Image (cartoon, rainbow, N blue to C red):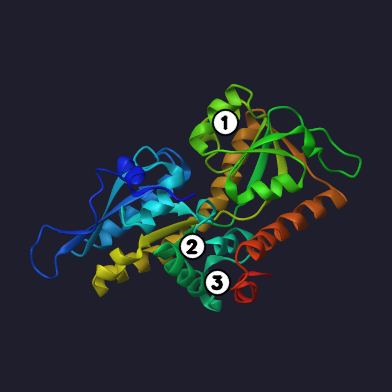
Amino acid sequence: MTISRRAVLAGAASLPLLGATRHAAAQAEVTLNAVHFTPAQVSYARSFLKYVEKVNRAGKGIVQIRVRGGPEVVPFPQMGEALKNGLVDMVNYPAGPMLNLVPEGEVLSATSKKPWELRANGGFDLIDGIFGAKANARILAHVDGGAGFHIFTVDEPVRTADGGVDFSKLKIRSAALYREFLESLGAGVVVQAPGETYTSLERGLVNANCYTVLGYQNFGWNKFTRFRIDPGFFQTDVLIMVNKASWEKLGAPARKVLQDVAIEHERESYDANLAGTREQGAQMVAAGMKVVELQGAARAAYLEKAARVSWERLAKRDASRLGELRAKFAG
């Protein structure tokens, strides 16, 4: 959804752009203003703040990141446009909500490859170039990768004879990223930002929710959803991105700090995401959540459909780079 510049400015009025601080000389330390897509207490924001801390330590006298907040500063659906328009310098934000700007962002959740494998085979440079052309963004890192998304339900799911679940009984709070996959299962879908989900569950407007295990408890959603459907599908697609114009204004030393720390954090956050997923999943099970495991042919069909839907949607929206992207991201 395209938003007006006025709408973003209303949420980001206190966000000055890239500017020199402390020194007036040509080599002045610069400050980038940043926002993150979840509230500060959620695991994804905490991961981003670790990156910021490392940059500010390594970049003292060169570059600093000033975090202005999360969706209370720039509303969740508007962060991609805010970055594109230069109203913020940096965002910690998934590719999924930006599919209207960059349909090719599908590949980041559809792929089973690790971020460093994509750096090695040229896939990362390919998608970075596409984001640069379509979203005016430079991708520094694909962070918090590895884990997938799960469907959490209020009531015990109705099972089918083939080992699956009758998804037609579910009305699921969804993100745009996996809406079509959930619809292909026969579920009812309501696309909402995470901040709206608690109220929807509380009022019974939905009877299921789709999200990652990591961070789920931070929103308090586990108060309502007592069942989790396994296995997970897709891969988390959280990115650290810088407005392209802001990036180009930086000197080489500042760029090096931001990029080197991003690559380091990319791998560290991948491992931390998997560990946190195991830990928080166990916590919810210990507190009474039941795991509903898809079996046999139903499990295979579920995973196959998840893998296929993203590529089909990309082919419908913009197939111009499909062959190149498949060569790097598929498999």
Mark positioned earlier in the residue sequence (1 or 3): 3
Judged from the image, the secondary structure of the residue bearing numbered disc 1 is helix
At a point 51% along the width and 61% down the height, the residue shown is 102
Q: Is residue 220 above or below residue 128?
A: above
Q: What's the residue at 66%, 59% (across, down)? A: 313
- Disc 2, SS: helix
Task: Determine which residue is flagged by label 3.
Answer: 118
- The amino acid on which the numbered mark 1 sits, given as a three-letter code, is Trp
Residue pictured at 65% horizontal, 29% vertical: 206
Q: Residue furthest top?
A: 203
| Residue 50 at x, y percent in the picture | 37, 51
Look at mark 2 in the image and give the residue it sits on: 267
Residue on which the image places disc 1: 221
Residue placed farthest to the right in the image? Answer: 161
Left of 212 or right of it: where is 134? left
From mark 2 to mark 3, how far is it between C-alphas? Answer: 12 Å
Q: 274 or 5: nearer the eye?
A: 5
Nearest-to-viewer mark from 1 and 2: 1
